[in-house]
Image (cartoon, rainbow, N blue to C red):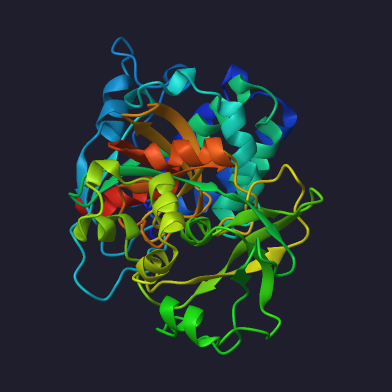
Amino acid sequence: MTLGAPAAYACARLRAALCRSDLKGPPTRAFLLSALTLIAPLHALQAQEADPPTIDAAAEATPGPSPADPQSEAAVQVASPRPVAAPAVLPVPLDLPAEPAPELTYSVLTFADLPGWAGDDHLAALTVFLKTCGDLREADWAAICALGRKQAESPRSARAFFELVFTPVLIQDGAPMVFTGYYEPELAGSRDWDVHYPYPVYALPPEAPSGESWLTRAEIETTGALKHRGLEIGYVGDPVALMFLQIQGSGRITLEDGRQIRLGYAGHNGHDYRSIGQEMVRRGIYDASQVSAPVISNWVRRHPVEGAELLRTNPSYVFFREITDAKPDDGPRGAMNRALSAGRSLAVDPRYVPLGAPVWIEKKGFRAMRRLMVAQDTGSAIKGPQRADVFTGTGRAAGREAQRMRDTGRMVVLLPIQRAYAMLEEGSAL
């Protein structure tokens, strides 16, 4: 990564932070000095460039510049929102597809540009952030995590942490923001087949090719290709609930003695998902406004033969693994193999939003949210920089909330200072 002027700005911001009353104390000062030690040499390599903008310590102590502050004009020039063309070398790993992608724009914001920021529970967000922060291996993330652990004392210190080391960046490709929800289903079931629980939950077959199309749902269910091979993790009683379990990618089977089988995503058969609800509308069974998970389940129960055939029009099939080391109160495992947190964990497209990064969401519609979340999961339907899935929790209530959610709004990723301002180097001068 070429830092140059962004490194200069990061140095100025870190030096200003040494004066902040809410970030004093030997451990924090030691971190700030060590961060300066890492960044200052990068700044020195670009010493021939123009001087960095200066930031007054008092102005840095509050979100957004003060119009009365003589230094605020420079701060506004650096941090005010403005679209920036995507640089030739992106500051975060994006693994972009080979086909032409929509042109990206980056708008670097201030925390004052985030409605509701001051009213959020930053300590709750920091607690979730620290669950996966240790899995981020880059040097700048490691230093940030070290400070985060020291600042997890109060909502005030947590807010100061996020405002010190991160910069909000709005990444867009022209598509509107879409928020949906997902949850962890709970199904009644059994370890063994019986007449009440006849539908198997399968582990991933060893011969299933990764990333390639394999047997369809119809072929798996009608040919017996997986039967009696020891791949059955458990059995459930509702084929529609089983399909929704596969759509969510994780869940729990509650046994008759109260114990639970925890299920995590293991793989799929390589076929795209086809909506059962849309198929029912296409066949004239229901209008689009009438279709819901309970409606589908009831119809399949009343028409078992036609229902089985209907479900098999969706060729996609998901396989699971049993999770044995999870605590009862833990959420399901996300893409980072850590427990998800209801209302704070977010599924994103990692080509644009790095896993583990804090993400500010402004969700409109049903149960509007202005909240700091953490990108800790992915999803096959989550494509684009303004697309996210909100994890709502476990069980029926969480399922109802998730199924109602399809809302617009805005999503802003929080990136380490030097990464965020490196975006400006190619397209605009500071």
Q: Residue at x 50, y 87 (%)?
A: 223
User: Hey, which quadrant is residue 276 in on the image?
Assistant: bottom left
Viewer-proximal residue, 272 or 360?
A: 272
Q: Is residue 293 left or right of residue 257?
A: left
Q: Nearer the viewer, residue 237 or 141?
A: 237
Tell me if residue 343 can be seen: no
Can you give x and y, in whole percent of width and height, for residue 364 in the image?
Answer: 31, 29
For residue 360, what is the image quadrant?
top left
Q: Please say whether residue 154 is visible from this viewpoint.
A: yes
Determine whether 215 is above or below 180 in the image.
below
Left or right: 327 in relation to 335? right
Quadrant of image for the N terminus:
bottom left
At horizontal 64% and vertical 46% (from top left) the residue drawn is 331
Q: Nearer the viewer, residue 102 or 56?
A: 102
- Relative vertical location of residue 412 with respect to residue 110 in this rendering, above or below: below
Residue placed at 37% from the left, 45% from the top? 292
Picture layout, residue 397 above or below residue 98: above
Where residue 318 sits in the image (x, y, percent)? 50, 69
Q: Position of residue 423 (x, y in %)?
A: 31, 51
